[in-house]
Image: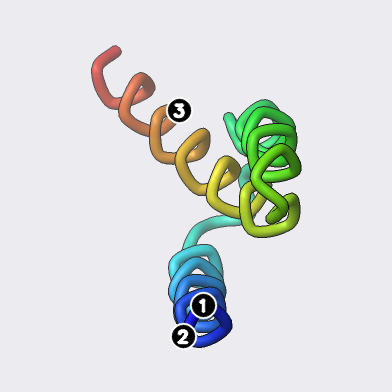
Amino acid sequence: MTQRFALISALTIGALLAGAPAEAKGCLKGAVVGGVAGHMAGHGKMGAAAGCAIGHHNANKKAKQG
């Protein structure tokens, strides 16, 4: 069950990132924070991918606000 959840999560994150532009705003910082948090939980790569997606989302949100 855990492997199925990890696979679905990874595919979902991959699909979200594949449609995003190639800008790295927020991704690097988010990936570092997410990777460290994920490493503590035993899922470093998944944490880095999720952190990158969240960091990129937050950077885009701040850019739209002005």
Q: Are marks 2 and 1 in contact (CB under 8 Å)?
A: yes
- Amino acid type at circle 3 is Ala
- Amino acid type at circle 2 is Met
Cα separation, mark 2 vs mark 1, equals: 4 Å
Cα separation, mark 3 vs mark 2, equals: 33 Å
Q: Earlier in the sequence, mark 1 or mark 3?
A: 1
- In front: 9, or 13? 9
> Farthest front residue?
1
- Amino acid type at circle 1 is Thr
Seen at 50% across and 39% down, the residue is: 56
Q: Which residue is mark 1?
A: 2
> Percent position (x, y) of residue 40?
71, 38
> Percent position (x, y) of residue 15?
48, 76
Neighbourhood count class around disc 1 (C-alpha, 10 Å): few under 14, some 14–19, many 20 upward? few
Q: Is residue 58 above or below residue 35?
A: above
> Percent position (x, y) of residue 48?
67, 47
- In front: 35, or 63? 35
Q: Quadrant of residue 37?
A: top right
Q: Earlier in the sequence, mark 3 or mark 2?
A: 2
> Percent position (x, y) of residue 11?
52, 80
SS category of the residue bearing label 2: loop
